[in-house]
Image (tube, rainbow, N blue to C red):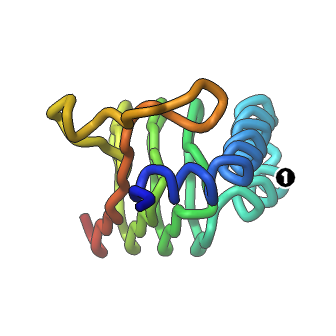
Amino acid sequence: MRDEAEDFLETAHPDALRQIARARELTREYYFSAYSDTRRRSEILRELLGGIGDNVMIDTPFHCDYGKNIFLGNNVVINMNCILVDNAPIRIGSQVLIASNVQIYTASHPVLPQERLVTGWKKGKGTFFRPYALPIEIEDQV
């Protein structure tokens, strides 16, 4: 009988690494783009994120895992040095202000070692722990 960690690792691992690598490339390009080049910065965010409304400002540095699981409403400000770990969807409504150094994590793992660790794990065949992710929603006007 297969366990959930084996299923997750076998199906998501290779594509997940490619998606994370692409998100890293885009966030790096965004970081080094000219602050005044609003057209290019908007193009990068539209490629990086799953959905983005009007009048969105994300300051740098900004970090995320996939990007495609992040959905932003209208009139959103994400201040500098924020991290959004989007292993599951992160939905941020409209008229939302997020302060500097905020970290929003959908990913976690069990705390107890007997629940967290994967027995029989082999290097190169995924991770040695059981991760999970839960969606996060921040409603309008927060």
Question: Which x, y percent locates residue 22?
Answer: 77, 45
* Foreground pick, 4 / 51: 4
Residue depicted at 70% across the width and 43% down the height = 17
In the image, 126: left or right of 22? Answer: left
User: Where's the N terminus, which quadrant?
Assistant: bottom left
Residue depicted at 74% across the width and 39% down the height = 21
Amino acid, disc 1? Arg
Q: Is residue 129 above or below residue 7?
A: above
The quarter of the picture where residue 131 lies is top left
Question: Which x, y percent locates residue 121?
Answer: 48, 32
User: Residue under circle 1?
Assistant: 40
The quarter of the picture where residue 55 lies is bottom right
Residue depicted at 25% across the width and 64% down the height = 142
Could you classify mark 1 by the number of other residues whose Cα lies within 10 Å: few (under 14), some (14-19), or many (20 or more)?
Answer: some
Question: Which x, y percent locates residue 119?
Answer: 37, 34
In this view, the residue farthest toward the front is 1
Determine whether the residue tagged by mark 1 lies in a helix, strand or loop: helix
* Foreground pick, 28 / 58: 28
The quarter of the picture where residue 101 lies is top left
